[in-house]
Image (spheres, rainbow, N blue to C red):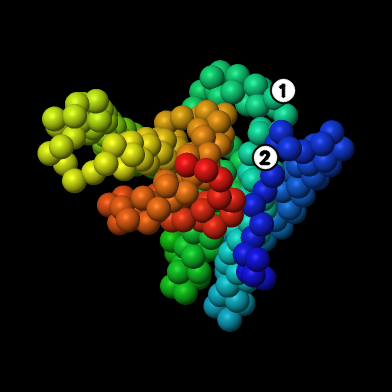
Amino acid sequence: MSDNEVSPPRHGQELGKKERARLFQHGIHEEGVFYARLNFFLVFESVLLGAVVTAFSSKNPPPQNISIPICILGFVVSVAWWFTQVNKFILLRTLEDRLEEALDEFRETLQIADQRGIFYRWSASSFLAYWFPLLFIISWICLGCISGSGSRIVMMLAQLNPADWIGIAQLIAIVVSVVLVMRQLKQSARTQSLKAYLDQRHEVFRLNELVLNNEDLRATVDMTREQLLVYMLIGWCEVIFVQKKYASISGEIWQSQDALVTRIFAFPFVRARWADIKHEYMKSFRNFIDKKLEKMPVKAGT
């Protein structure tokens, strides 16, 4: 194994009781670090942003040689916040996935929470990691532009009456609604694309099964019975992979199906056939199988 190659993680069922306890404690620790870092940056950014807005709203706003460097400082800190928070969130999500695999109670709790949640598969932590720091980044960019042209815009905003703010809030609500609708339409298009692909694959499976069970039809194709069977098995593996890619199956189902894919590709005759027909499949599936073949042992026999 090369220095840059990452060893595959063990499945949750392969971990001992002490290892699962350490994994759980690691998850608790990283969650605490995630929210502690969030609170630190949030307090720092809020105080700095509030001070700048107050200074801009005063009768004697600070000169540009002071206001612009402060805005640049706030922008740099916000970018650092976004970068560190996202990386910590990725680690936290990885630990959560491993805990879901290792602890049955944890997995059942998450499944029940997803069913009772208002937004299925929507994560508040992802919003706090990805989008919350971006709001401050955008705010610092806007303040930097304002400070470059004076504080007239801030003073104008301060003079708006409640009716004007209600109109602005309604406009923002409309924009957010449009974004959500577009996201829903995109998800619907992905679902339709997945359905069309699965229907096509099921039809191919049906035709292959007819050829496999009919000697006259099998004589019309340039494949042996074993090659046709391997072609069907690999096609089934691709269907499972695509369903996982589109998040249409749960992690528990994927775990069992992935183990079955591993057993299928452990056979030498499947590997040999894969080397001949791999170019017919999508790139992401090819990369998935090739990486799996690099790490798994070859099963003896045919």
- At mark 2, the secondary structure is loop
Q: Which residue is mark 1?
A: 105
Q: Residue at x 19, y 29 (%)?
A: 215
Disc 1 crowd, CA 10 A, few/some/many (<14, 14-19, 20+): few
Q: Residue at x 27, y 41 (%)?
A: 224
Q: CA distance from mark 2 to mark 1?
A: 16 Å
The answer, for residue 135, to whether it is visible in the render is no
Q: Nearer the viewer, residue 63 or 299?
A: 299
Comparing marks 2 and 1, which lies closer to the viewer? 2
Q: Amino acid at mark 2?
A: His
Extreme-bottom residue of the structure: 65
The answer, for residue 236, to whether it is visible in the render is yes
131 relative position to 18: left or right: left
Q: Nearer the viewer, residue 93 or 164?
A: 93
Numbered label tally: 2
Q: Amino acid at mark 1?
A: Glu
Q: Can you give x and y, in whole percent of width and height, for residue 187 in the image? A: 34, 36
Q: Can you give x and y, in whole percent of width and height, for residue 19 in the image? A: 82, 40
256 relative position to 3: left or right: left
Q: Can you give x and y, in whole percent of width and height, for residue 241 in the image? A: 42, 40
Q: Residue at x 40, y 53 (%)?
A: 272
For the N terminus, the quadrant is: bottom right
Q: Can you give x and y, in whole percent of width and height, for residue 22 in the image? A: 84, 42
Badge number at residue 57: none
Q: Nearer the viewer, residue 106 or 289?
A: 289
Q: Which residue is mark 2?
A: 11
Q: Residue at x 67, y 48 (%)?
A: 9
- At mark 1, the secondary structure is helix
